[in-house]
Image (tube, rainbow, N blue to C red):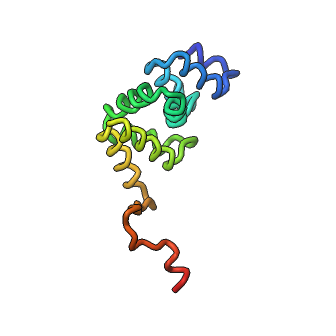
């Protein structure tokens, strides 16, 4: 990791190509963690989304499972401290997990999303909800 960190000419595109060519959990975790007080070379959330978009869902889900082993706080820390990956993108990740049979992982991510201040979940089936109702009264 130290060797990669020394080369500041690597772009995030270069690193995304690297993880696609070498999708090892250890490498991706190294690239997405702080090192010597410096920010990560790569956004964890964007790395997962990139893996999902390049037919490498199993690798992305495996990474999420590894983080999930650290408990709710580990995933929440990543979600809150990743300035390049919005909460909406985390919801996309939760949906991919759910679609691929990883219900518990999806539920953990969604639970954290629901607990964030200012986040309100509106069910699509609830036809009594009218977001614009206040405008017309």
Residue 19 left/right relative to 124: right
Q: Residue 34: horizontal and vertical position, in percent? A: 51, 29
Q: Nearer the viewer, residue 124 or 135?
A: 124
The image shows residue 100, relative to residue 95, as above or below, that is: above
Q: Residue at x 33, y 44 (%)?
A: 108
Q: Residue 127: horizontal and vertical position, in percent? A: 40, 70
Q: How many marks?
A: 0
Q: Residue at x 36, y 28 (%)?
A: 66
Residue 10 left/right relative to 21: right
Residue 55 left/right relative to 114: right
Q: Quadrant of residue 107?
A: top left
Farthest residue to the top: give it. Answer: 3
Q: Residue at x 40, y 32 (%)?
A: 64
Q: Residue at x 32, y 36 (%)?
A: 101
Q: Residue 118: horizontal and vertical position, in percent? A: 45, 61
Q: Nearer the viewer, residue 85 or 99?
A: 99
The image shows residue 117, relative to residue 12, as above or below, that is: below
Q: Nearer the viewer, residue 107 or 98?
A: 98
């Amino acid at each position: 990791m130290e060797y990669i960190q020394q080369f500041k000419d690597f772009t995030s595109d270069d690193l995304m190509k690297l993880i696609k060519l070498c999708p090892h959990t250890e490498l991706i975790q190294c690239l997405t963690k702080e090192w010597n007080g410096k920010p990560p070379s790569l956004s964890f959330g964007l790395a997962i989304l990139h893996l999902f978009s390049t037919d490498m869902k199993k690798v992305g889900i495996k990474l999420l499972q590894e983080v999930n082993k650290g408990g709710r706080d580990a995933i929440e820390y990543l979600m809150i401290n990743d300035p390049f990956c919005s909460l909406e993108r985390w919801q996309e990740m939760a949906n991919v997990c759910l679609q691929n049979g990883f219900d518990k992982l999806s539920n953990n991510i969604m639970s954290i999303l629901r607990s964030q201040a200012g986040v309100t979940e509106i069910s699509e089936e609830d036809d009594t909800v009218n977001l614009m109702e206040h405008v017309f009264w």
